Image: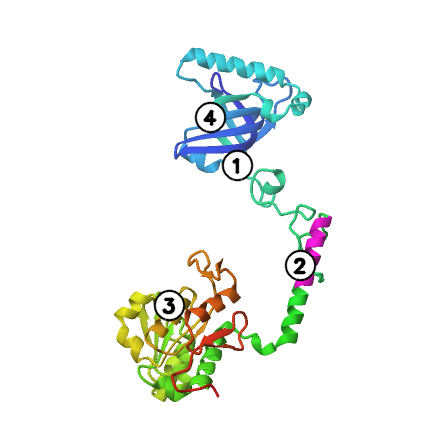
Amino acid sequence: MASGTVTGIGTVDRCRRLGKDLCFITVVGMTSVALDVEGLESKPVPPPPPVALPHTVEVTLRNAAWIKRVKRATVVTLRIQPEPSGRGAHAAEEKAGAAASAAANLSDRTVASAVPLATQPTIKFECVELIEVIPVPRGTRGAEGGGGRTKRKRGVTAPPCKWFLQGKVCPIEGCERRHVFATEAEARQAEAKRLSIEQHRAHGAASDVEHIRQHSKRGAVFGEWLVSTYGVEYLRSGSGVLDIAGGKQFVSLYLATAHGVPCTVVDPRPPAPLNPADALVLTQRGHPAPTYIRGEFDQAFAATHIDLVRSCSIVCGQHPDEATEPIVAEAMRVCKPFAVVPCCVFAKQFPRTLDGHAVSEYEDFLLYLLRLSGDVGVQRAEISLGGRNQVLFTLPLGSQLD
């Protein structure tokens, strides 16, 4: 063994890599050993040890091959020596003395184990030779505290099971989530939420099942309402229906495929790809596919595309969001019938007032749109849609709703 070196064995608690050939590791539980070179087995040295070591040491590795082998929670056997600093040999002697002093204070393992690791001194050494690395078996790192993922324990700290919160029997065998209430407040909150869901479901079933439709079917519901209200021949007149904010083309595709109504979609979003089934139906029946124009429908758009607005049969929009008010205003400006299903109010983005009060509720927004259109026979109807299902519409001049 080289002069000033000692062979020890311990567990790597921390690795700090600063490059391919520089790494600082913190080794805990360091014990001096006598190395059996032939069998490559590390045997504890009977007391007193040849060179005493502190419980926790910091070792510098300067070999790329060693750095690749050493990982957190591995057991390493290495030959180390006190690390010299920039002050030369005197610093090395001081650190060696500090190591010996610390080792003397911690020679009794019973006493050392009672001292918290955070308060035990950390002595710096330099690795001279990495003799052996014993990896930790899989599945034991988390349990031993050496890193890795630990399985979440069941108990009060675990999140509650969703089946339990709904008052149902959990179907998951060995569910790791909590099946008890942590506090009385949590129990009251879960019960109130469960009752609210049950009341909502009961009200929806008792009111009208037809009002609950799939989102993909909403376009067909509104499109069929347009056909029954205005008639196919009128919708086909001129350049056809002007569908505002119909990015997914649910309404336009239904009118085009089912009734051959020409449609023009105006939406700032990119057009959705045409469904192959819809494309096949349009081709077989010889109906024109909807025309798509990217843009925001407002007064400037209407002025730029005035011919399109004037030649269309009707201006419509199903849940057109910000374009709801422009649909009513621009249709009234060119004396065109409109049909719109308002959805969001956008009270902060578009501040409006009605009788001196801010328009923030849905019913107030509908009344605001009715007054915006003036006395031109604006009517209100309800269609079979879930959610916002109120339609504000006008009929062509000289016609009436059957």
| Residue bearing mark 2 | 193
Q: Which residue is mark 1?
A: 72
Between the residue at mark 4 and the residue at mark 1, the CA separation in whole angstroms equals: 17 Å
Q: Specify the amino acid type for callout 4.
A: Cys
Which element is circle 4 on? strand
**Disc number for residue 326:** 3
Q: How many marks?
A: 4
Q: Is disc 3 surrounded by few (<14), some (14 to 19) or many (20+) residues within 10 Å?
A: some
The quarter of the picture where residue 275 lies is: bottom left
Q: Taking 34 as reference, is 254 above or below it?
A: below
Q: Position of residue 265 (x, y in %)?
A: 35, 73
Of callouts 4 and 3, the N-terminal one: 4
The circle drawn on residue 298 is none
Mark 2–mark 1 CB contact (< 8 Å): no
Q: CA distance from mark 1 to mark 3?
A: 65 Å
The residue under label 4 is 127
Task: State which tag comes first along the sequence, 1 or 3.
Answer: 1
Q: CA distance from mark 2 to mark 1?
A: 47 Å
**Front one among 308 and 310:** 310
Amino acid on which the number 3 mark rests in the picture: Pro
